[in-house]
Image (spheres, grey):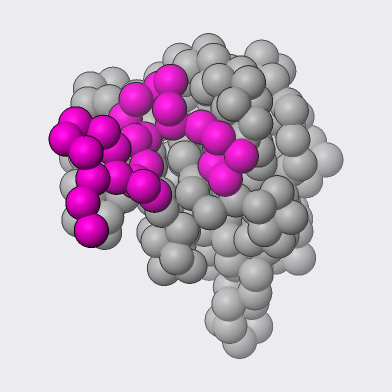
Amino acid sequence: MSSSQGSPRRGQWSAEDPSSRYGPLVGLVVVDVQNDFADPAGSLCVKGGSEIVPLVNAEIERALEAGGAIVYTQDWHPAHTPHFAADGGIWPVHCVRETWGAQLHAALSVRGPIVRKGAHGEDGYSGFSMRDPAGGDPIPTGLEGALARAGVKRIVVCGLATDYCVKATALDGRRLGYEVALLADAVRAVDLSPGDGSRALDELAAAGVVLIGDGTGAR
Ligand code: VGL
Ligand code: ZN
């Protein structure tokens, strides 16, 4: 088999090139761009979180123009969950369902389905699966189904936070067989330990995720 010089191989995804990144097989997964993470008044505010919103919106337009799908995830916790420090976890109370903190950032353009995670007290970070609060077994969210309904084989991931839900979602995407790209300039990290965001980007690259952009703001 041969391919003519300089032309992309059939089936190859030129995710780095914004003009060929999207098409009908490609889904943009916008992870947890919610007030508690993105707004300076949010209870788990991620430094620079709101800066990504214009970039994400531009990417949403690009994806839609090329016939791609957009799916959003939303952390959607009950008031008590083992995810929160008050109930044995590590996090301040955040993204409690039906509250301002759980709402998607007001400036984010919403042009596709929203997949909620954690609604029944499940723990975990991936947009694809949660952990049962009792047995710890993985429970799928609606993300894989939403992507399948849209015919998506390749996903572009962006959102909050790099070192938790973005990382877990992108890694799960690889495990589930998707080709995965990450918009490294449209993510921001919690950085509980300095360098967590940067290490997450390295881990994703090692797992075969294509990093788009240098992620300067995200590192
Ligand atoms: C997240 C910490 C706790 C995230 C969610 O969206 O990355 N991080 N819950
Ligand atoms: Zn959470």
Measured as percent of width and height from the top left, residue 110 is found at 73, 26
Measured as percent of width and height from the top left, residue 156 is found at 47, 40
Let me know if residue 19 is in the magenta part.
yes
Magenta-drawn stretch, dominant element (helix, strand or loop)? loop
Query: Toward the viewer: 114 or 131?
Result: 114
Q: Which segment is the magenta one?
A: 1-30
Query: Toward the viewer: 17 or 114?
Result: 17
Residue drawn 48% across and 17% down? 55
As drawn, 95 above or below 183: below
Measured as percent of width and height from the top left, residue 49 is found at 46, 24
Q: Image quarter for residue 211?
A: top left
Would you say 185 lies left or right of 43 here? left
Residue drawn 60% across and 67% down? 130
Measured as percent of width and height from the top left, residue 108 is found at 65, 20
Let me know if residue 178 is in the magenta part.
no
Residue drawn 43% across and 27% down? 20
Q: Image quarter for residue 111?
A: top right
Would you say 28 lies left or right of 161 here? right
- Residue 219 in sight: no
Residue drawn 55% across and 20% down? 62
Give the quarter of the figure containing the C terminus: top left
| Residue sticking out furthest to the bottom | 135
Would you say 34 lies left or right of 209 here? right
Number of numbered discs overlaid on the protein picture? 0
| Residue sticking out furthest to the right | 98
